[in-house]
């Protein structure tokens, strides 16, 4: 009888740790109860408090305000509440929300004072809003909207009486300032966003017929406009305070003569960085200390209320303390110095749950799990536009990428990184995407993509590499077709999280096992994005794919339309469509253009994806549009994987002080949550303005 291999003490300890963590994760997943989480003040059942109303709620007849603001009104330093609210305020529609209490401070962490994470907590600048984990779209700043028959023109009606945080009225002129004076300006670098482009990729025409009415006109049908208007948190687009920013614009201020005037202008246009910049969000920045902390206080003109008519937010103050070291952030959480933790931002992963549970008596926080909605978990992807020709040719060969996918032991990564949660995947869009929800055919398409190259089959991987000429040379390592050193370099920011670091080490080992040379190349985080956008890096593995509620409104991984993902130079070319620079430098090497950019090869996979994207965005019929998306998924299956996933829809950690109310549980969210997507901004979509303390005086 053959002897059994002995287990090292380290292996046994690791296995024990994994088992313990899996036990705790199971407890977090199965024991969530609304009453225990303290999410409402009336002990609603999970069924009664699940999801959000799909249709707008009528505002109540009477309104009330924070005692803090009432004192200012009494002192004459602030107008009365009915002069600050719009004629018809937005009523937060979440069924899990109960009537709250005013007051208190909410303590948070961030890795940088200028981090975009701060904006992810507030949805107040968005024209429209995602509801029910992307299943519905509700009103926002735009109260109602309609299109003509072929969706080439959209009319947006702003809420009457909306005001900026300094009390100045919001009008269509603030949208025209963004569009005409920045996007269409020949000097300003702003480009049209997705919501401002037609299906063909060309910019819209935007007009204001009166102070409250905007008309968007496109050169082709653009039926996805409402969804695109709900995407993200809109930090610096759509509505900008013209009355504040015009002093830094040469069109309005003659003393502004610098050629790079836009640099100073843009320092003031982001409300999260400039405390003086008016905003439309529930809280406004009142203190900005570079590298130390950002403090936000309630916006007295915020345009949202609860069902009882109480103007939101309930909490007076948000504080984001800057802690650059991830381990120090975790320690501060365990010591009780934080009130709310959105795990994706810290980051807190599944491997941290045991420690958080052990120290629960100190931090006094609920440890909950929301669905991540991730399509990949930690994702690896090559630069499809790598400048060195021989390596680029190999990268663009689908069989090369497919072989590497077959060589990846995802089961090991699922256990080591995600504690056997989620589902192994080749890499897709979010499994919660609308195209997968409504029919058996949609679910089948999802499974085909998920399973296309997911099997761990190193023998097949070796055979495929041999077939395309990536054979073992005299050194014992595989070489480029035709000879020459082949080195797969995984470029990562030096501050990459443990999740990605662990996965990358497993990936390196798996690929070295089939004869490849692999190097992990940490780089300074500063400038990493610019190097990638300019096509200088070979591959990266420090992100994940989640977007979006559907494939075409959060399309950045699905179709190269911007330079941050798997085909950066192609993405840059698409983003410049309809601009004066689009047709320039056509005789210049694509990697030497300013900025570097390249057009799609006719008939190639990116050309097919661009064509499908244009047709899908222009297709008015929803069923026909869904079929176009399915056709595009088949391009990913045949010519991919363009990005290589690990595990889909693993749980994401959320933590909140037990005394913090109206924080939803997984059971109360329509699809269990969709956390790891930028198009569906979380926690903003769940309205943290409605969170409140059961005893605000204990949290000042």
Image (tube, grey):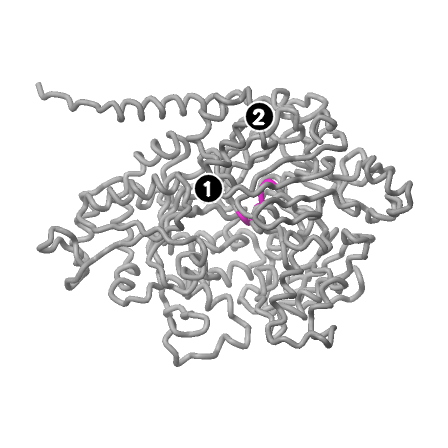
Helix, strand or loop status at disc 2: strand
Of residues 325 and 653, which is closer to you in this image?
Answer: 325
Q: Kindly identify which numbered label has been placed on residue 365.
A: 2
Q: Quadrant location of the C terminus?
A: top right
How far apart in space, not on screen, are marks 1 and 2 (Cα)?
25 Å
Of residues 347 and 401, which is closer to you in this image?
Answer: 347
Residue 39 location, quadrant:
top right
Q: Is residue 486 depicted above or below 546 in this figure?
A: below
Q: Which residues are magenta?
A: 678-683
Q: Which residue is drawn at the image coordinates 60% and 37% (left, top)?
A: 108
Please name which of the two marks, 1 or 2, marks the residue nearer to the observer.
2
Residue 88 is situated, as x and y percent measured from the top left of the image, at: 81, 46
Q: Which residue is mark 1?
A: 374
Of residues 94 and 114, which is closer to you in this image?
Answer: 114
Q: Is residue 138 among the parts visible in the rendering?
A: yes
Q: Which residue is drawn at the image coordinates 31% and 26% (left, top)?
A: 14
Q: Which residue is drawn at the image coordinates 50% and 42% (left, top)?
A: 676
Q: Is residue 250 left or right of residue 188?
A: right
Q: Is residue 560 magenta?
A: no
Helix, strand or loop status at disc 1: loop
Do the residues bearing badges 1 and 2 touch, measured as CB atoms within 8 Å? no
Q: Is residue 267 left or right of residue 461?
A: right
Q: Which residue is drawn at the image coordinates 74% and 30% (left, top)?
A: 100
Q: Quadrant location of the N terminus?
A: top left
For the stretch drawn in magenta, what is the main secondary structure? loop
Q: Is residue 438 among the parts visible in the rendering?
A: no
Q: How many marks?
A: 2
Q: Kindly identify which numbered label has been placed on residue 563.
A: none
């Amino acid at each position: 009888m053959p002897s059994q291999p002995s287990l090292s003490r380290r292996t046994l300890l690791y296995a024990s740790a994994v088992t313990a963590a899996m036990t705790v994760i199971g407890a977090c997943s199965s024991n969530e109860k609304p009453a225990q989480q303290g999410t409402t003040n009336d002990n609603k059942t999970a069924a009664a408090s699940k999801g959000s109303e799909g249709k707008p709620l009528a505002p109540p007849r009477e309104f009330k305000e924070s005692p803090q603001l009432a004192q200012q009104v009494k002192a004459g330093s602030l107008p009365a509440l009915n002069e600050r609210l719009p004629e018809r305020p937005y009523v937060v529609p979440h069924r899990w929300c109960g009537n709250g209490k005013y007051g208190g401070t909410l303590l948070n962490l961030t890795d940088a004072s200028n981090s975009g994470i701060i904006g992810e907590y507030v949805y107040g600048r968005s024209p429209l809003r995602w509801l029910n984990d992307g299943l519905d779209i509700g009103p926002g700043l735009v109260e109602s909207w309609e299109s003509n028959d072929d969706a080439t023109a959209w009319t947006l009606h702003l809420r009457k009486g909306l005001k900026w945080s300094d009390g100045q009225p919001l009008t269509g002129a603030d949208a025209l300032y963004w569009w005409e004076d920045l996007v269409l300006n020949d000097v300003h670098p702003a480009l049209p966003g997705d919501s401002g482009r037609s299906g063909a990729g060309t910019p819209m025409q935007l007009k204001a017929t009166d102070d409250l009415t905007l008309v968007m006109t496109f050169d082709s049908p653009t039926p996805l406009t409402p969804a695109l208007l709900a995407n993200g948190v809109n930090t610096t687009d759509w509505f900008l305070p013209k009355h504040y920013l015009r002093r830094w614009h040469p069109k309005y201020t003659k003393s502004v003569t610098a050629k790079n005037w836009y640099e100073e202008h843009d320092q003031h246009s982001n409300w999260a960085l400039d405390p003086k910049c008016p905003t439309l969000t529930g809280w406004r920045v009142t203190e900005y200390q570079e590298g130390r902390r950002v403090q936000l206080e309630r916006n007295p003109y915020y345009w949202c209320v609860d069902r009882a008519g109480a103007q939101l937010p309930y909490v007076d103050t948000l504080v984001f303390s800057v802690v650059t070291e991830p381990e120090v952030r975790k320690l501060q959480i365990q010591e009780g110095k934080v009130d709310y933790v959105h795990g994706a931002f810290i980051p807190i992963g599944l491997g941290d749950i045991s420690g958080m549970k052990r120290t629960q008596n100190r931090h006094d926080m609920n440890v909950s799990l929301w669905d991540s909605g991730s399509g990949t978990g930690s994702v690896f992807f090559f630069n499809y536009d790598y400048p060195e020709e021989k390596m680029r040719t190999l990268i663009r060969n689908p069989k090369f990428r497919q072989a590497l996918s077959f060589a990846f032991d995802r089961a090991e990564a699922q256990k080591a990184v995600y504690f056997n949660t989620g589902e192994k995947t080749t890499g897709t869009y979010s499994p919660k995407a609308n195209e997968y929800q409504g029919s058996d055919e949609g679910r089948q398409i999802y499974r085909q993509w998920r399973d296309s190259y997911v099997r761990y089959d190193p023998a097949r991987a070796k055979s495929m590499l041999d077939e395309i000429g990536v054979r073992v040379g005299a050194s014992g390592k595989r070489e480029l077709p035709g000879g020459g050193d082949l080195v797969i370099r995984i470029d990562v920011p030096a501050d990459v999280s443990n999740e990605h670091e662990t996965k990358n080490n497993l990936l390196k080992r798996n690929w070295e096992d089939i004869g490849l040379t692999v190097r992990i190349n940490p780089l300074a985080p500063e400038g990493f994005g610019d190097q990638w956008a300019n096509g200088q890096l070979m591959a990266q593995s420090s992100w994940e794919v989640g977007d979006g509620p559907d494939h075409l409104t959060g399309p950045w991984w699905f179709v190269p339309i911007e330079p941050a993902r798997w085909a950066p130079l192609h993405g840059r070319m698409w983003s410049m469509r309809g601009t004066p620079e689009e047709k320039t430098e056509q005789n210049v090497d694509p990697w030497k253009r300013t900025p570097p950019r390249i057009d799609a090869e006719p008939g190639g996979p990116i050309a097919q994806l661009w064509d499908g994207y244009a047709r899908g965005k222009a297709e008015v019929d929803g069923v026909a549009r869904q079929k176009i998306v399915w056709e595009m998924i088949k391009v990913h299956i045949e010519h991919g994987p363009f990005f290589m996933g690990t595990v889909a829809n693993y749980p994401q950690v959320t933590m909140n002080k037990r005394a913090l109310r109206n924080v939803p549980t997984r059971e109360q969210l329509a699809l269990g949550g969709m956390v790891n997507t930028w198009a569906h901004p979380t926690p903003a979509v769940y309205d943290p303005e409605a969170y409140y303390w059961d005893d605000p005086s204990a949290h000042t």
